[in-house]
Amino acid sequence: MRLAATLLLLALTVATSPAAAAERACPPAAGVPTPAEITQAMRSARDRGALWRFARDGRHGYLYGTIHVGKLDWAMPGRAVFGALADAETIVLEADPLDVTFHAGVIAPAQPHEAPALPAPLVARLSRQADRTCASWRRLQTMPPMMIAATLTLLDAAWEGFFAEYASEMVLAGYARGADKPIATLETTAIQRAAINGGLPAEQLASVDILVTGLEQGTTRKELVSVAEAWARGDLDALRRSLVDIAPAERAGVERMVLPRNPAMAASIETLHASGRRVFVGVGILHMVGATGLPRLLQERGFTVERMEFDGRIGLDIGGVEGNPARGPLPGGVEGNPLRGPLPKE
């Protein structure tokens, strides 16, 4: 897995908007699900990703590995995940993707100490990728370089039917609002910006070059599909291998952007648990794997942590879910989503 997959699982802040130029070959747009499509999604819903139940001091909570893009037919939670959401009193995310203030803070222009100036040839290559995905380079070029690369990676995913609008966090945030459950976040805007824009200038430029090369050669899209399918299967071994079997420079990027954040996340989960409310914590799946993953770190803090096995059953009880706020996240998470605005199509 290249750095592109890491950015895919890191970036919470970008969603596409409909293509306006019919004469151009633009990626498909996510669109707003119809009532019939929502009903079908409920009938075909199955559990994806990975879910753990953790407990301490006589109380329990849930930990769920998410992915930051998705498909409509993946978006509806399955029986086990839906049951955990219904049982939880607070929904906890890395950051709230529907928070306009958070979004604006993460995509704000880079400060001089944050990011290097892009060489003209690299700017030209990024601009060509923006044009290929029908995105506005005028708007993209104001973002930090790594955010531009992450955005183009997500926009490119639409060619394979993956959209930021159907990301796990979008559905979870929509569910929380529809079910009138409070949302707590594990990270601030500053932490997210530091994760994306971290590293020495030369390291950032090398990472951007790797991503653009992957987009130009079409390898990024294949890698994205591979990672997404591993997530859908809940295949932590495949995801763990993907972190090991990469070049040292790319591994350094993963270690810089993902792994150092885990201890602080674990501490925040512990604090939220101590508040006495049952929490459902949704965090990118790469934060779950290996000896430094959140399940292991919670065990080290005295929690019992057990992965919940999915039984493979398909479909939700529509009679029991009809009228439930969980029906809202799909259309609510796309239509009127404030994240659609920043990247208008040309």
Image (tube, rainbow, N blue to C red):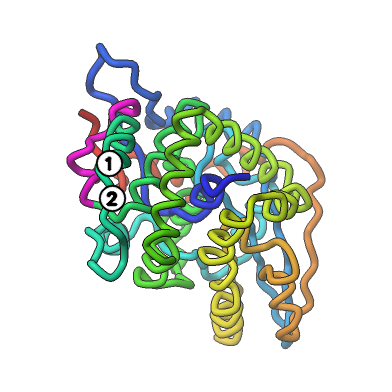
Whether 132 is among the magenta residues is yes
Where disc 1 sits, the SS reads helix
Looking at the figure, which quarter contains the N terminus? Answer: top right
Front residue (pair 96, 220): 220
| Labels 2 and 1: the sequence-earlier one | 2
Where disc 2 sits, the SS reads loop
Q: In this view, does 160 lie to the left or right of 291?
A: left
Q: Name the residue under label 2.
A: 118
Q: Which residue is drawn at 48% across and 65% down?
A: 94
Residue 191 visible to an observer of this rendering: yes
Distance from label 2 to label 1 (Cα)? 6 Å
Kindly check if marks 2 and 1 are in contact, taking CB atoms under 8 A apart as contact.
yes
Q: What residue type is labelled 1?
A: Val
Number of the label disc, if any, that sits on residue 81: none
Q: Give the range drawn in magenta.
A: 131-142
Residue 327 visible to an observer of this rendering: no
Q: Mark 1 points at which residue?
A: 123
Front residue (pair 81, 237): 237
Q: Residue at x 40, y 24 (%)?
A: 28
Residues packed near mark 1 inside 10 Å, few (<14), some (14 to 19) or many (20 plus): some
The percent position of residue 203, horizontal first and vertical second, equals 45, 59
